[in-house]
């Protein structure tokens, strides 16, 4: 098949959606399909190992340049500005399927010429709903969600139950590495227990709860490694200072996605204390692939990543700092400080959440949607 991904941000910024677009493009190419990535003018091109993924960029007007009638209006306007420049080229490709990653792109089927054979699929990673999106959604032919929790969100809003394809992890790249050199570089002793988080430092990620938990571990040699930037940085730094744990919290600027395994290698466990619904949690899966047991909130799609069995990590109630501190003590009480749990975490991701598996699920969803209504299972 000829498959296109349209996302204005794919070629201009980093993030979970962008990672999914590029990794699925690579995996689908390996499976023998012709894949196009359509994005905004930008120079982001991940290393695809020489794969023949066709990349097309077009001019667009960034959201900050539109009147501030709300973030959703700005994002919709930004994407439509790209579509105005790209629509003729996309139509000429005569793609079998176009995969959209945000509801803000639901207008695309209306831009295709009469008689176009191109069908449109929505690959969801969240809930960016907006007024009027249900009407536009009627022209979407295939629906995919990144978790069963996300599938329920879409069904509740659009009354269309999607296929669950899950996100993936490049388990060859995200793998356990020796961490002694990185710990030495950071001045971390071998007897210290390090919790690591990588991602945006924003309120709903719940990182203030992790700092509260660290303050409850006064009798433990523990560190908190926060990798990333965001609006909550200054507030988190002030909190650490106020609680007397500033020396134990290491703030590291956002790192290239490819560099994260070396940072996870310096940690003993991952901590992901989200207090808002997380549709999947790709950074959690990446930390697990690196052999880390994880302490994560029992919210949204996170339990589907970590599992409810306790064999790959510990799920805690959102906002419960005491539960995070107790989870650290539980890991420390084990002879291997939780390394066996980390090995199970790695195995879970490597066997269930690879990008090849995700691509195969995507193809199955497209094939199912492409059948006549009476032939669908």
Image: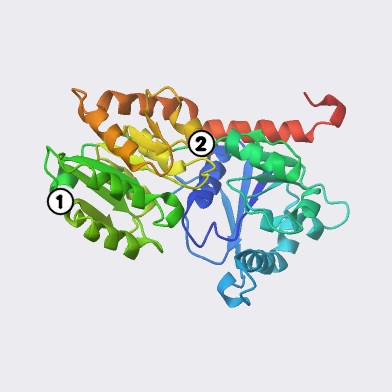
Of 156 and 213, the residue lying toward us: 213
Splitting the image into 4 quarters, where does residue 370 fall? top right
Specify the quadrant that holds the C terminus: top right
Of 336 and 212, the residue lying toward us: 212
Q: Is residue 1 visible?
A: no
Give the percent coordinates (x, y) of residue 281. 47, 42
Q: Is residue 32 visible?
A: yes
Question: On the picture, is 275 further left or further right than 106?
Answer: left
Of 72 and 58, the residue lying toward us: 72
Give the percent coordinates (x, y) of residue 154. 68, 42
Q: Earlier in the sequence, mark 2 or mark 1?
A: 1
> The residue tagged with tag 2: helix, strand or loop?
helix
Question: On the picture, is 272 further left or further right than 29?
Answer: left
- Residue sitting at x 31%, y 32%: 291
Question: On the picture, is 332 further left or further right than 302?
Answer: left
Residue 226 versus residue 222 in the image, above or below: below
Q: Which residue is mark 2?
A: 355
Specify the quadrant that holds the N terminus: top right
Q: Which residue is mark 1?
A: 185
Q: CA distance from mark 2 to mark 1?
A: 32 Å
Give the percent coordinates (x, y) of residue 44. 47, 59
Give the percent coordinates (x, y) of residue 34. 64, 43
């Amino acid at each position: 098949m000829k498959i296109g991904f349209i996302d204005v941000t794919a070629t201009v910024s980093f993030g979970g959606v962008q990672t999914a677009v590029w990794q699925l493009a690579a995996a689908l190419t390996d499976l023998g399909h012709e894949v196009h990535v359509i994005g905004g003018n930008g120079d982001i091109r991940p290393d695809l190992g020489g794969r023949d993924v066709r990349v097309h960029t077009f001019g667009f007007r960034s959201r900050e340049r539109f009147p501030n009638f709300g973030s959703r209006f700005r994002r919709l306007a930004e994407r439509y500005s790209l579509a105005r420049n790209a629509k003729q080229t996309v139509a000429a490709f005569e793609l079998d399927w176009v995969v959209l990653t945000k509801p803000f792109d639901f207008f695309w089927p209306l831009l295709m010429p009469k008689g176009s054979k191109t069908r449109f699929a929505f690959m969801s990673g969240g809930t960016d709903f907006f007024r009027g999106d249900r009407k536009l959604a009627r022209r979407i032919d295939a629906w995919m969600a990144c978790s069963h929790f996300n599938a329920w969100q879409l069904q509740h809003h659009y009354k269309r139950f999607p296929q669950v394809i899950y996100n993936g992890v490049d388990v060859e790249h995200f793998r356990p590495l020796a961490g002694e050199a990185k710990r030495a570089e950071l001045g971390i002793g071998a007897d210290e227990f390090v919790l690591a988080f990588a991602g945006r430092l924003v309120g709903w990620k719940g990182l203030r709860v992790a700092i509260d938990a660290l303050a409850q571990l006064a009798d433990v040699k523990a560190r908190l490694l926060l990798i990333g930037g965001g609006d909550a940085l200054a507030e988190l730094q002030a909190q650490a200072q106020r609680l007397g744990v500033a020396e134990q919290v290491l703030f590291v600027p956002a790192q290239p996605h490819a560099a994260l395994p070396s940072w996870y290698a310096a940690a003993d466990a991952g901590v992901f204390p989200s207090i808002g619904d997380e549709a999947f949690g790709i950074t959690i899966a990446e930390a697990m692939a690196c052999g880390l047991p994880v302490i994560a909130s029992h919210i949204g799609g996170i339990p589907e990543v970590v599992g409810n069995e306790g064999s790959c990590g510990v799920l805690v109630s959102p906002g419960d700092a005491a539960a995070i501190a107790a989870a650290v003590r539980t890991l420390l009480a084990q002879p291997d400080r939780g390394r066996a749990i980390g090995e199970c975490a790695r195995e879970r991701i490597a066997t269930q959440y690879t990008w090849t598996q995700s691509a195969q699920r995507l193809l199955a969803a497209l094939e199912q949607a492409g059948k006549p209504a009476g032939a669908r299972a």
